[in-house]
Image (spheres, helix red, strand yellow):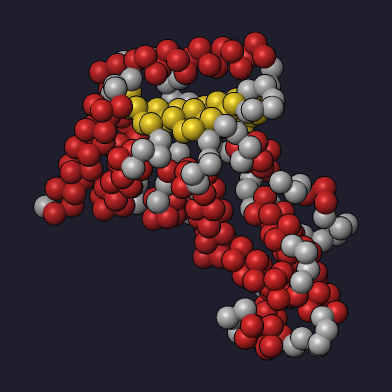
Amino acid sequence: MTTPNSLPPGKTPREYYGSELRRLREAALPKMSQEKLGALTFVSGTYIGQLENSVRSPQIDLSLRIDDILDSGGVLVRIHELLEYSRFADYFKEAVEHESRAVSICEYAGSVVPGLLQTSDYATAVSLGAQPLLSDDELAELVAARMDRQRLVSATTGPELWFILDEAVLRRVVGSRRIIADQLRHIAALIIRRRLIVQIVAYEAGAHALLGGMLSLMTFSDAPPLVYLEGQHAGQLIDDTGLVARCQRSYDLVRAAALSPEASLALILSAAEVHENAQEQ
């Protein structure tokens, strides 16, 4: 993935994208107006202008179409990767880069559904809960970035995914009863489609090795494993061999204490039904 070090001095990723789009369009032969490029790529000329002036953020499918029309050699798609990278919090950016190369990701979440599994409604509620004064544009950007990460879940060549969730994740009403019920149904559907494995640590398990935290273990085909730990406003990427081994042991202990995948699916569906029934009352 491209990193922010590739940016020209003094430009944000969105500004860089806009200036390169304008340069490529104006250099095209025959001459290409904003209106003509918009018509060829199924958007308005006004929207092309908004991209060039850094008012709007582009979508990957549009970047692909423009690169093809302008025969740019994939320039805009490469800048688009840089733009996506910049949407994450500074402490999370490096973890996202490694996440995209991982062959396996094993994650524990003690209070919130992991970002890779969140629905857009749930992600919206979580984001507003943490930052209630977000503007509509900032909120949309945060949620879109989270949804984009989920290509790892749907990709047939993506990493092997294993999630352990505390039962509190199932019980907490985030946004509304409908939102959490839909969220749990979404997780259940992914399990049934065999996209990932999920285990639940039931309340009855008591104290365990990862109580209250968030941990992600990533393994790679060409590099040693990494661990990412995150709190509300900070995260830490760990590559120290000894600490990674200790985190792996803690994860294994929690995995042993968790319900089986089959029992976990049943509990997820049961919790969804509880929320749905409560909503109807």
Q: Position of residue 59 (x, y in %)?
A: 60, 65
Q: Quadrant of residue 25?
A: bottom right
Is residue 263 rendered to the left or right of residue 248?
left
The answer, for residue 57, to whether it is visible in the render is: no
Is residue 3 rendered to the left or right of residue 192?
right
Q: Residue at x 30, y 16 (%)?
A: 205
Q: Is residue 75 depicted above or below 96 in this figure?
A: below
In the orientation shown, which residue stands out farthest toward the left?
A: 281
Q: Residue at x 60, y 37 (%)?
A: 99
Is residue 175 rendered to the left or right of residue 155?
left
Q: Position of residue 46 (x, y in %)?
A: 64, 85
Q: Residue at x 69, y 88 (%)?
A: 36
Is residue 64 rendered to the left or right of residue 232?
right
Q: Position of residue 65 (x, y in %)?
A: 64, 71
Q: Quadrant of residue 267?
A: top left
The answer, for residue 6, to whether it is visible in the render is: yes
Q: Is residue 277 depicted above or below 225 in this figure?
A: below
Q: Residue at x 71, y 76 (%)?
A: 69
Name the one closer to the observer, 181 or 207: 181
Q: Position of residue 96 (x, y in %)?
A: 62, 41
Q: Is residue 84 depicted above or below 69 in this figure?
A: above
